Image: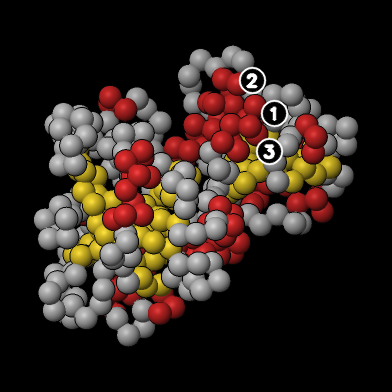
Amino acid sequence: MMAAWQSAQGVCVLVTVVGTRGSSYRSPGARMLILPDGSRIGAVSGGCLEGELCRRAHWWTSQSPAVLKTFDTSTQEDNEGFGLGCGGGIDLFVERLPAPDVAGETNPLLAQQRVNQSRQPSALAVLVHATEGCALPVGERFALENAHDHPEIATLLRRGVKLGYSFTQELREGPFSGCRFFVESLTPPVQLLVCGAGTDAQPLVAQAAALGWSITVMDRRADFARPARFPEAERVIAANDATAFAPLRFDQRTAAIIMSHSFAQDTFFLETLLDTLLAQRLGYLGVLGSRRRTLDVLARLGRDAIPACLHAPAGLDIGAETPEQIALSILSEMQATFTNRPGRPLRQRDGSIHGREHRLEYGPDQHDNAEQHSTPLRDCGLL
């Protein structure tokens, strides 16, 4: 998306999901970039809205660079005349992007690029509904760096960083009382370290790349650790010793899977990574293979039990047998771990399938419930 915007010859339009009600395919924060020729990158629905958005987004923003559009999909005919029948509603913020050479620090694509490079989470706030007396225009953006004069907005931004997901909030006090801001949480992509470059690692790398993850493959066997075997990986490293880990920056958005099928290699990788996991500098560490084999590896390291934080055997119980199925099982467990989900069938889940799992506690005046990050915007007077 970033490269397409930077190379586009003309005006690009960014469409962002800022609110949902009922059934929805995408959550707040999902983006789609519409290029000058009407083509697109990304999606904001299950394919119901994208065609019409590509046809009309440039026209919608011709008079005002930022507009809010609501689509009610709860019936067979929504307020734009589409027969969607998805069972809910979606609020989309449609805005023209400035040219890359004049874009500022609050540009969402540039801000995401900085987060990807620094691997430090951040947040942006954009005004999506302004009251009559508000001095700011709809579309005004804020980052922590330029929100010093607006403590209410700075508080929203800090909350967005801590929560790790995007939400819409109406301010009830101060100069922006009645105004609504969409707070976009910006997180770095998951880093995946695959320790083992065997044939079964190839579908794992391919599937992880489709998820947009940043992938490093490592193996002590140089004939296995070849970039040609893993074209989707950013790095393929022949790990002669522990110094091979030096270029890697571990954090809570990093997952590692040990799957070399070599007892000596697995011992080497686990010895190197286990302390990083126990120090909470690694978000996920899994070992392919039976529980008994992992216990034997740990015994070599002077440990007599599998630590609770070590995923061994790695993966969810989906009856996986083939390399592709095993890759799906492992990546599914990683995804569930990073999103704090149990990995059970959605039919057993109470409430919205997109509901967020709460990881923070707030005082009575700051409490966020499952509906606040999908605040309805259809009555904002902008549509």
Q: Which amino acid does label 2 sit on?
A: Pro
Q: In this orientation, which residue lies closer to the viewer: 105 or 247? A: 105
Secondary structure at numbered mark 1: helix
Q: How many labels does the image show?
A: 3
Q: Name the residue under label 2.
A: 323
Q: Which mark is in front, 1 or 3? A: 3
Q: How far is mark 1 from mark 3, CA to CA?
A: 9 Å
Q: How far is mark 2 from mark 3, CA to CA?
A: 17 Å
Q: Which residue is drawn at 56% across and 20% down?
A: 325
Q: Is 28 placed left or right of 377 in the picture?
A: right
* Label drawn at residue 232: 3
Q: Is residue 279 visible?
A: no
Q: Is 132 placed left or right of 187 in the picture?
A: left
Q: What residue type is labelled 1?
A: Gln
Q: In this orientation, which residue lies closer to the viewer: 255 or 236? A: 236
Q: Is 256 placed left or right of 181 in the picture?
A: right
CB within 8 Å, label 1 to label 2: yes
CB within 8 Å, label 1 to label 3: no
Q: Is 374 placed left or right of 166 in the picture?
A: left
Residue lying farthest bottom?
A: 149
Badge 1 or badge 3: first in the primary sequence:
1
* Label drawn at residue 202: 1
Name the image quarter holding residue 320.
top right
Badge 2 or badge 3: first in the primary sequence:
3
**Residue 167: percent from left, percent from top:** 29, 56
Q: How far is mark 1 from mark 2, CA to CA?
A: 9 Å
Q: In which quarter of the image is the C terminus?
A: bottom left
Q: Which mark is in front, 2 or 3? A: 3
